[in-house]
Amino acid sequence: MLPTNPFGPHNPFPGVMKVSTPEEEIEVEVVDKVLNWRFEELARAGFNARQALQLAGDRSVDLHTAVELIKKCGDEYLAFQILS
């Protein structure tokens, strides 16, 4: 069973400001969807909720590399340490 998605309808990452135009609102919605998707994929691969949350929000972490790394090493803690 996958952990509950911690993002909910809003992006919890610092630096995201309240938007005022429809175009900006759409952009924030897209970012939220991408973060949600990254979190779900990382959790599905085997990272725990805390690890998946941190990795999902880190733009320097390539999702496909993270998933392959945890599959190959089989140790979520080691994979997380390598990626973070």
Image (cartoon, rainbow, N blue to C red):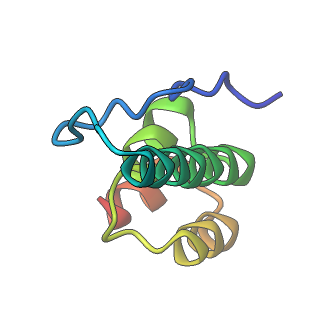
Q: Position of residue 30 (x, y in %)?
A: 54, 53
Residue 65 drawn above or below residue 16: below
Quarter of the view holding residue 45: bottom right
Quarter of the view holding residue 65: bottom right
Quarter of the view holding residue 51: top left
Q: Is residue 56 left or right of residue 54?
A: right
Residue 21 drawn above or below residue 2: below
Tell which of 50 and 10 is nearer to you. Answer: 10
Work out which quarter of the rendered image holds the C terminus and state it.
bottom left
Residue farthest along the front direction in this orientation: 21
Q: Position of residue 67 (x, y in %)?
A: 63, 67
Q: Position of residue 57 (x, y in %)?
A: 37, 50
Q: Residue at x 47, y 52 (%)?
A: 31
Tell which of 21 and 3 is nearer to you. Answer: 21
Residue 53 drawn above or below residue 55: above
Q: Is residue 39 left or right of residue 77?
A: right
Q: Is residue 72 left or right of residue 21?
A: right
Q: Residue at x 20, y 37 (%)?
A: 17
Q: Residue at x 39, y 68 (%)?
A: 61
Q: Is residue 20 left or right of residue 22?
A: left
Q: Residue at x 83, y 27 (%)?
A: 1
How many badges with numbers are in the image? 0
Residue farthest along the right direction in this orientation: 1
